[in-house]
Amino acid sequence: MAQNICLAPVELPPARPTENASPIGESIEIQSRSLSGNAADGIQEFTGDVRIRYRDGLIAAERANRSEDESVIEVLGNVSLEGEGLFVYAESARFDQNTREMRFTDAGLDLPEAPARATAEQIVVSADGLISLTQIMFTTCPEDDVDWELLGRELQIDREAGFGRARGVRLKFKGVPILAAPYFSFPIDDTRKSGFLAPQIAERDRTGFDLTVPYYINLAPNYDLLLEPRYMEERGLQVRSTFRYMLPTSNGQLNFEQLPDDDRLNRSRHFVNLDHQSSFGERWQLETHIEDVSDAAYFEDLGDSLGVISQTHLDRFVDLGYYGARWSLVTRLQEYQTIDDQIAVTDRPYERRPQMVFQGRWGDRLVGFESTAEAVDFDRMVGVTGTRVHSTQELSLRFGRPGMYLTPAVGFVQTNYRIDAQLPGQDRSPSRGLPVTSLDAGLKFERTAGSSQSWIQTIEPRLLYVRIPYEDQSSLPVFDTILPDFNLVQLFSKHQFIGADRIADTNQVSVGLTTRLIQSASGRERVSATIGQTRYRSPRRVSLPNEPATNSRRSNYVAELDINLSQKWHLDVGYQWNGETEETERTETRFEFRPQDDRLFGVGYRHRKNVLEQGDLSMIWPVGDRWRLISQYSYSLLEKKPLERLVGLEYEACCWRLRLTSQRYIVRSTGATDESISIQLELKGLSRQSATPEELLGRGILGYRRIDADSN
């Protein structure tokens, strides 16, 4: 719940000098201007600025009467009780000394820290801090602008537990009844507790009228449950749930969605996701990730964003690993569920049943040795299957001084296969072994810059030489090897391919130059720029099946620029230029302007020659004192059509927030789109805001973060 306080706490005037004081027990003291007694009935009367102190509370009134046995005190005239985070006021009250219970009649209640307030026919404050009210009106709105109010027969507020329980409830917004319930619970602070989250109402092409009413259940300090009943006019009733748990040696999250009967398809649909981690002692770890969906169109039909529906595969794996001081051993079982029907069966990923990976690193300041070994059994319904055993051993020398390093290394890569079903006459046990030699060297120069020497500028050249001889690998299967996009990471990589099925022959020199501008006082890097290129001394001959070898003698020039001179704006540029064709191969640019925490303007541009050219605009900006505009727009310049559009308008009052969003995004590779309009009303202090609307607004906006108004 946002903490922008609109209800000012009431401050009591200081007590006047005490003329009469009467202590009661160890923790109660009555102060007043005068004290008189009635011998007939044994009642003592305190008058004039009466103050009753007990524990952390202070009761103030015009006068008070104490019974003969001193067990009951009647407090009269402008009565108020001020305690820690609590203020109660009334015309009369009754304090029971034995039970330490304070009973107010025709009273009001303020909880300044919440902030919240209430009025009631009777308010009872017990010794344990429990507050009980009858015939109540409860709200977090200021007294002169009550936009919403909760009316009820009874209300119980447990400040220690952080929630309220109401019975016989009627909820009004702007004077219009919007809810009636026999029982209702809600949070009164930021402590985790059970209660309703902000409901979401939408109208979507694929679901029709769409209503979600989440309910959070705080089962225990170490596990909880989020239930999200969702009614879709054209699909039916769906139940979504998220169960989180944290045990002494384990933690995880289970997401489950079930649509028992899709009214359009007349069948059941579901999605389940499990993430689990366990530790056994200091070295052993278990990690599990399992996803399953009932059909390929599930996310397209029932998803609510481009990010959700663009998935093509669901990953499933179980890892069991031992992590020592210098080495680790991990065993993995992995498979994928392909949910894009347009992906050919022969192009779908292999299952690993199992995969075992050993990694170790030993050495001292001068000598280093690294060892990696992998054994994996690849399985699939179609195509070549079999087992691959791959290992890399590398010995390096490390020469270094401040501002420089030189690392020569020699290694050997060995790969052996066992093919399950091979064509007659072909080798069922092909293998490959290749030496790898490399030399990695770098320098770092520094100098102070600026008129007041407030900056440090660095110049950091780097050189990597790699030589791997050629070996014909056309007879080897390809299980999981790809050719990645060229970037700064690949510029200083010894291997062209990712995966062990192909080891590219090369005789190359990669050269890069980085410069940084660092603020001396804070040590923060404000500017970073890198440029580099790889030169090949001989043609490369190894390639993936059905792809030609790359015969270019030099790579693209690759450059990156990151500028963050102030907290207000940031520029990030990535660029690749082909020196042979003298054309731009790839560009990625992102500019963000954030003059204050509650506003953001961003521009992005992405270009990849003959593949894509896209631009996007994003904005989070206040409009007036209470309105805020949130928008994002992506457009394909190559296809000349919009990809995604999101416009949100948000109004934030002192005690409530209203969001209206309109979204359009592509849901199928054919270009079909889905449009939705959603509305969400949050009554602060009554419903806790769900993460779903903020995720909806943030998915399409790079750099988006939740912004709450600090004051109004």
Image (tube, grey):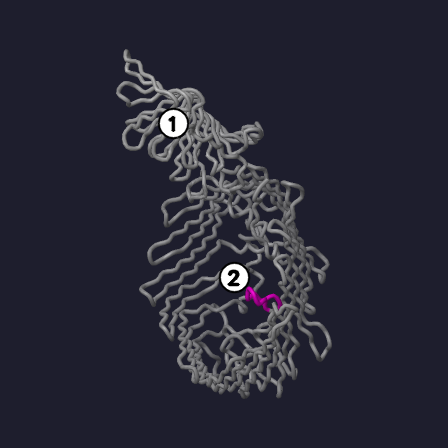
Say if residue 541 shows up in the picture: yes
Q: CA distance from mark 2 to mark 1?
A: 77 Å
Closer mark to the observer between disc 2 and disc 1: 1
Q: Residue at x 65, y 82 (%)?
A: 554
Please tell me whether residue 173 is drawn above or below residue 484 in the rendered image.
above
Q: Residue at x 42, y 80 (%)?
A: 371
Q: Is residue 519 magenta?
A: yes
Q: Residue 288 placed where, x, y %? A: 41, 61
Question: Which quadrant holds the C terminus?
Answer: top right
Say if residue 486 shows up in the picture: no
Residue 301 is tagged as none
Q: Is residue 521 magenta?
A: yes
Q: Secondary structure at mark 1?
A: loop
For badge 1, the amino acid type reads: Thr
Please tell me whether residue 117 is drawn above or below residue 404 in the rendered image.
above
Q: Quadrant of residue 374?
A: bottom left
Range of magenta residues: 518-527
Is residue 477 toward the left or the right of residue 581 in the image?
left
Q: What number of labels is visible?
A: 2
Q: Nearer the viewer, residue 407 or 242?
A: 407
For badge 2, the amino acid type reads: His
Q: Residue 519 placed where, x, y %? A: 59, 66
Is residue 704 toward the left or the right of residue 256 in the image?
right
Residue 18 is tagged as 1
Residue 313 is tagged as 2
Q: Residue 487 placed where, x, y %? A: 60, 73
Is residue 611 toward the left or the right of residue 19 in the image?
right
Q: Quadrant of residue 566?
A: bottom right
From this viewpoint, which residue is outermost toward the left?
A: 69
